[in-house]
Structures are given as C-alpha cells and as structure tokens.
Image: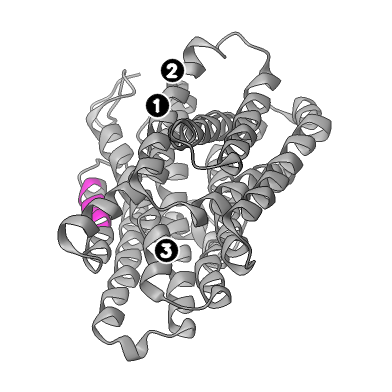
Amino acid sequence: MYTQNTKVHVRLWHHDFWRLAFANLLLTMSVYMLIPFLPQWMRMDNMSTAVVMGSYGIGLFALGGFCNYLVQRYRRNMVCVWSVAFLALTVGALYLLDIHPELKNPYVLTALRVAMGAAFALAQMVLASTLVIDTTESFMRTEANHSIGWFGRLAIALGPLAAWGIEALFGKSFVIVGSAACCAVAIVLILLVDIPFKAPEEDVSKISCDRFFLRHGLCLFLNLMLVAMAVGIILTSHTDPVFFGMMLAGFFLALFTQQLVFENAELKSEIITGLLLLGAAQLMLFSGQYVPTTFIAPAFIGLGIGIVGARFLMFFVKLSDHCQRGTSQSTYILAWESGVAAGLFVGYAIPVSPQEMTWISILFIVAAFLMYHLFTHSWYLNHKNR
C-alpha cells in the first residue's frame, strides 16, 4: 500500500538509486586509482611493495563484524558517510607523506593500507547491503544488486584511467588529491539520498556475521577469490591507459553479451566462458606485444571479469536465506577485494619476468576453472535457496 510516510519507487532507476550507483562508482574508483600509482610513488623493493599493497586485504575484514551493530545503533547513511570520510582521510595522509618523504616507510604505508581496506569494506558493506536495499522495492532488489555491482566493476578500469589522466595533466601527487576528491563527491551523493528510518532491533550483538559474511557461502567465496587473485596479478603488470581503456570496452561488451548471448543459455556456461576468456587473454599476452594482442587481450580480460563477476554475484544472492541478501553482498565484496589484494601481493613479491608472472596468473585461472567445473557448480545447485 502507498502511504504518505513511505516513499514508493515503481521504477528502479530513480534519483536516489542513481546517486547510490555513482557513489559506489566513485568510492571504488578512489581505491583502484591507487593500484597503478602507489608502487611507482613508493619506489621500494619488491617485498616491501608487496606487503604494502597486499595488507589492504587484511583491513577488509577488520570492521565487518561490527557492521550490523553499527547500522542498527546509528543512522545507516551516516555510518557509510563516516566510513568514506575515514577512507578519504587515509588517502589524504599519503599526500602528507609526499610532502614529508622522511616519513614514507613500509610500516607507515602498511598501516595506512590496512586502514584503507577497513574503511572501504565497511562503506561498501553499508552501501551495497543496506542503503541500496532500503531504497529499493522488494521485487526489484535482485536487479538493484546486479546494477550496483556493475558500477563497482567498471571502476576497476575507470580508476586507473582517471589516475593516468590526472597524472598526465597535473602531476603524480595530484592522483592522491583525485582519489580523495572521489570520496568527497561520494559523500555528497550519499547525503542527498533519502534513507527511510528503521527502528533498531533489540539485543543486537556488537560482533556478528550479519551483513558481514555468509558462512555457508564459503565455497563460492574461495572460488571467486581464485579468480580475483588472477586479476590482481594482472593489475601488477599493466599500467598503460590503452590496456585499461580496452578493458573498459570489454566490460561494456560483457553487459551486452549477458542480454544477447547468455539470457537463455545453460547456467554453467557463463562462468566457464568467462574463465576461458581470461585464460585466452593471458596466453595472448604471453605470446608477445603484437598490436592486435595489445587491444584484444585486455578487452577479453574485461569481458571475462564482467561475465564471471556478475554471475558470481547472482549466485551469492540466490544462495542466501531469507533476510540474508545484504550479507551475500558483503561476502561477494570481501571475496573479490581480498582476492585482488592477495593477487597484488603475489604479483609484487615474486621476482620474475612479466611473462613468467603471466603463467602464475594462468595457474590461478585454471584452479578456479577446475574448482567451479568439478565441485562449485553442482554444490551451488544443491544449496541455493532462490
């Protein structure tokens, strides 16, 4: 029933949803802008760089257990705003280190990266698992989760592209400013969203898995993490704008193929196809830097990531029990981001040539392929709830 006190959205793409979608895009861009930038800016040995870049993954799990308590105890939109503000503060601290290079050491940078991971994960959990759901009618929430996920996925390519453009126009230090500015605009967009008031539940535990981790989704978590580790390794080897531009084209191509190719296809075909595309792209890169390869391979990577990421997100949603939709979103975010962080660590820690690193990435793709084909798919069909 429509009432005077409850805003009802008969369409998904209303103003508040657009604001949250772009807030998610900018929030994710602020983190991915730093991936190609930080290693060049730090100028440290391989192992120090690996520890700093990978420690972000540890921070992802630091505050998740408190997520449900925080959104029950405080205004949920303000929990998200303060999390994004804290992320902007940690990014801004990098600018201070740029001014005072004597403070730029692995210990300080590792602490900042852990703090970034904690702030980003909490902000993402509240935004994707609570704010999006609260502003969407129940029959449109699966489509809302799917759409919001795509905005975050596009940031994987848009973030590095923005970093390259800012560095080319204004200088390397302004990449930090650009990252913090993305957080600031995301805060404004979130504050503009009309979030309905919800009375807090009684006897809420301060630490719980609610809105944090879907325990019976561990199999999907590990399988997606293997894919994300391969992507993290790929990101350590490529920093040129052409690569990320073609990856972005691959993401848009994935959006069309989901509608035109996989709409009535067998369920298993999407992830199998996406993983094959990722493997083929890596083999192309291994074969040499020929002109067609430099365009086709990153497009295949974007296409593969888009197909695999979108399908795994739907698997998490359909695996969740009643009232666990938000928890499934958080688990998906943790699997992807922790996998990318682990891939960054591996990519910088192992002192091998880019071609040899390509083989390591292929090993993770093969492991993800075998796990999904031999176990995960049948396990999911036996345990899904929707």
- The label on residue 256 is 2
- The numbered disc on residue 119 is 3
80 and 341: which is toward the camera: 341
Q: Are marks 1 and 2 in contact (CB under 8 Å)?
A: yes
Is 151 displayed left or right of 302 in the figure?
left
Magenta-drawn stretch, dominant element (helix, strand or loop): helix
Q: Residue at x 53, y 52 (%)?
A: 337
Front-lying residue, 10 or 118: 118
Secondary structure beneath label 3: helix
The image shows residue 137, relative to residue 351, as above or below, that is above
The boundaries of the magenta stretch are: 182-189
- The location of residue 289, given as percent across then percent down, is 49, 42
Q: Residues within 10 Å of mark 1 (few under 14, many from 20)?
A: some
Is 178 part of what is drawn in magenta? Answer: no
Is 320 placed left or right of 381 in the picture?
A: left
Q: Quadrant of the N terminus?
A: top left
Instruction: Note whether residue 138 is visible.
Output: no
Q: Which residue is mark 1?
A: 252
